[in-house]
Image (spheres, coloured by chain):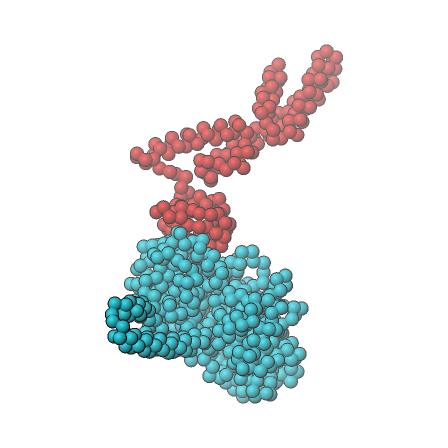
Chain colours: A cyan, B red
Amino acid sequence: MFVSDFRKEFYEVVQSQRVLLFVASDVDALCACKILQALFQCDHVQYTLVPVSGWQELETAFLEHKEQFHYFVLINCGANVDLLDILQPDEEAVFFVCDTHRPVNVVNVYNEAQIKLLIKQDDDLEVPAYDDIFRDDEEEEAEEHSGSESDNGSEPSEKRTRLEEEVVAQTMKRRQRREWEARRRDILFDYEQYEYHGTSSAMVMFDLAWMMSKDLNDMLWWAIVGLTGQWVQDKITQMKYVTDVGILQRHVSRHNHRNEDEEHALSVDCTRISFEYDLRLALYQHWSLHDSLCNTCYTAARFKLWSVHGQKRLQEFLADVGLPLKQVKQKFQSMDISLKENLREMIEESANKFGMKDMRVQTFSIHFGFKHKFLASDVAFATMSLMESPEKDDSGTDNFIQALDSLSRSNLDKLYHGLELAKKQLRATQQTIASCLCTNLVISQGPFLYCSLMEGTPDIVLFSKPASLSLLSRHLLKSFVFSTKNRRCKLLPLVMAAPLSVEQGTVTVVGIPPETDSSDRKNFFGRAFEKAAEGTNSRTLHNHFDLSVIELKAEDRSKFLDALVSLLS
Amino acid sequence: MVIINRYKHANQLLVGFENFPYAEIHIFVLFFLYILTRNEVKSGGRSDLIPTIKFRHCSLLRNRRCAVAYLYDRLLRIRALRWEYGSVLPNALRFHMSAEEVEWFNHYKKSLATYMRSLGGDEGLDITQDMKPPKSLYIEVRCLKDYGEFEVDDGTSVLLKKNSQHFLPRWKCEQLVRQGVLEHVLS
C-alpha cells in the first residue's frame, strides 16, 4: 500500500527498531541511501546496509538476514515485482520500498500489511482499480456447491426445472467470469507493458528529511546528484527533470541564500550550492574543452564527429565562438581568463547557429574551498564510473563501497579518481560509437535495430556492466539517428549485445526505446525479452532490476532474436 | 669465581629459551673459549692472553644485555596484548609465548582485574574500554572480512559479511575494530 504520511508511518515506526537496508547499484539509490543513513545516524537507529545488484543477490541476502530483522527498507529495487512471492518472508516482516521503477506491481499496491510503498502518489501511476483485478472467488464456489447439494432432496420434476435453471445460471456465471478474466488480462497487460521511472528516490528521502526539519545542505546535494543521475542516464523526460529542478531550486535558495548577500557571505571553505544555467558538456571543467566537446554525446552526435566532415565542422564551430585551438586543447582550468568569462553565452550563441538549441541546461554546482567546484553531472558521472569500474571486484560490492564513499566530502580523492574513470569511459564510448557507425555494425532487423559488439573490441570490458552498456546504447542510437538518411530507421528502437563472460559464453543484451523528441522514455523491452525467452527456451537470466537488461547464452542469440523479431512485428 | 657466577646466571636465563639459538651458541662458544684461555693463563702462565680474556668478557656482557633487552621488550608487548585483545588470547599468539611468559601474563591479568574491581564502587570499572574519548554513542562500521554472526545487546544478532555496513553501539564494536574485522567509517 502507499504510505501517505512518511514520517508517521515509516520513520517513527522504524525509529526504535533495527532496520536492514537493501540498496541497488545506481547513483540515485546511493544518494537516497546516504540521506537515509544521515537521518538514521542522527536518531541512533541501528541499521545494517547490504548492497545488492540483482534479484539473486537480493534473495540470497534476504535469506541470510531474515532471522535477525523485522523491518526492511529497499531502495530502488522491488517495486516492480511481486515481492512476497519472490522473498517468501515471515508474517511479521515489513518492507518499505522506495523505488523509481514503474509500473508498481499490483500485489505490492494492494497488500496492506507487509508492503509499504514510499512513493508519492501524484506521480502518474495509473494503477488499475482493485475490483478490476482481484475478486473474491470463495463466494462463487460456495454458491455452486450449495446449488448442487440442495437438488438432492427434491422431487424429480421440480428437480429437472431447477436443474435447468441452475445450469443456465452457472453457464452465465462462467461466461461472466471468463469475460472478467479476459478484461483483467488486458488491463494488466496494458499496465505492465511499458517500464519507466518515477521521481528520484533521493528526492523522496530529502522530502522526508525536510518534513522532519532535519535537512542539511549535504542532503540537498545528494538529492541533486540523484536527480541528475537519472537525467544523465535518460531515465526521466526533460519535462520531469525541469520540474524537479524547480522544486530543488527552492530548497537551494532556502539553504544558500546567505551567499548572495555581500556583507554576510560565508567563508570560502563552507559548502555552497548554487543554481547554474550551464553548458551541457560532460566534465568540461575537469577536462579540456575540446575533449569535452568530442566526448559528450549531444555535441558528438550533432557534429557527426565520427566523420572527417564532422571534425571540420567542429573546427568551424570553435572558430565561430572565437576560441583558439591551442587554448581549447588545454586543461580548462588553465585557459585564459578572458576567454572563460563569457564562455557560456558565446558557446550558446554559436551552438544555436549550428543547430544545437539546448546547449545549456539547468543544473546545480557545489563549491567548497578555492579548488573544489563540481557540477552535479560531474559527480553523477564519477559515481557511475566508480560503481561500474572494471577493476578487480572480488565480492561484487567493493565498487559499491568506493562509490558510496566518494559521495562524502571528506573523500575527494575518490571523487577525482572517479572523474578520471569517467573520462576514460566517455572516451571509450565515443570511440566505440564511431567504429560502430563507420563499419555499419548497426543493422535493421525489421521492427528494431540491432548492434552486437565483438569480443576483440577495445575497451569491451568497460561495457559488460548494465549501466555502461545502456549509456553506450543510448548514445549509439542518438548518433545513429543523426547519421542515417533512412527516415524509417530513425524511429526504431535499438537492441544491443555485448559479451559478458568468455568462459561462460554469455552476452548482456539491452533494449533501448526509440529516440524521438517527445519520447516519454517508456521501455517495452522488459516484457518483450521475457516472452521471447519463454517462447524459444533460451537460457536467459533476468537478474537486473531494470527488466530491459538481460544475460543470454551466446548460442541462443540467433533464435532469441528471431523470436523477438516475430514478436514485435 | 664471581665472573663465572655471573655467566651461570646468564646461562640460566637462556636455558628455557628457544628463540635465538644463534645468540645462545655465540655466548656458549665465547664462554667455552673464555674458560680455555683462563686455564691457559692460570696453568700455562701465559699472561699475554689476559687482554683476550677481557675482550671476551666484554662481549659476553654485551650479549647478555641484548638478551635481557629483548626479553623485556617481549614482556612489554605481552602486556599490551591484554589491552588490545582482552583476557583471552587467540591460540596463534599463545603458541609463540613461552610457559613463563604465559604465567606472567596470567599474573598481570589478575592484578589488572583486582585493580579494576577496586575502582568505581561495587561493580568495578572496566578501564580497557573506550581508550580514546568517544565522540558518539553509535558508530558506523564497515565489515572488512566475513565474520559471521555477532550478538547485539537485545539478544538478536547481526550477520557480518564483507562490505556490509552497520550502525551499532560503540562499546560492542570496539573489540572487533581493534582486531581489524570492522573498520570505522568516518563521513
Q: Is residue A207 visible?
A: no
Residue A159 in the figure: left or right of residue B9: left
Number of numbered discs on residues: 0
Q: Where's residue A378, x and y in %?
A: 50, 70
- Residue shown at 73% from the left, 15% from the top: B40
Extreme residue in the top direction: B43
Considering depth in this image, is A532 or A81 the residue closer to the camera? A532
Residue A155 in the figure: left or right of residue A201: left
- Residue shown at 38% from the left, 70% from the top: A106
Considering depth in this image, is A414 or A244 the residue closer to the camera? A244
Q: Where's residue B48, x and y in %?
A: 74, 18
- Residue shown at 48% from the left, 44% from the top: B179
Residue B60 in the figure: left or right of residue A54: right
Q: Where's residue A119, x and y in %?
A: 36, 69
Q: Is residue A397 visible?
A: yes
- Residue shown at 60% from the left, 85% from the top: A484
Q: Quadrant where the N terminus of chain A lies?
A: bottom left
Q: Where on the picture, by quarter, is residue A254?
A: bottom left
Q: Where on the picture, by quarter, is residue A74?
A: bottom left
Considering depth in this image, is A164 or A546 the residue closer to the camera? A164
Q: Quadrant where the C terminus of chain A lies?
A: bottom right
Extreme residue in the front direction: A156
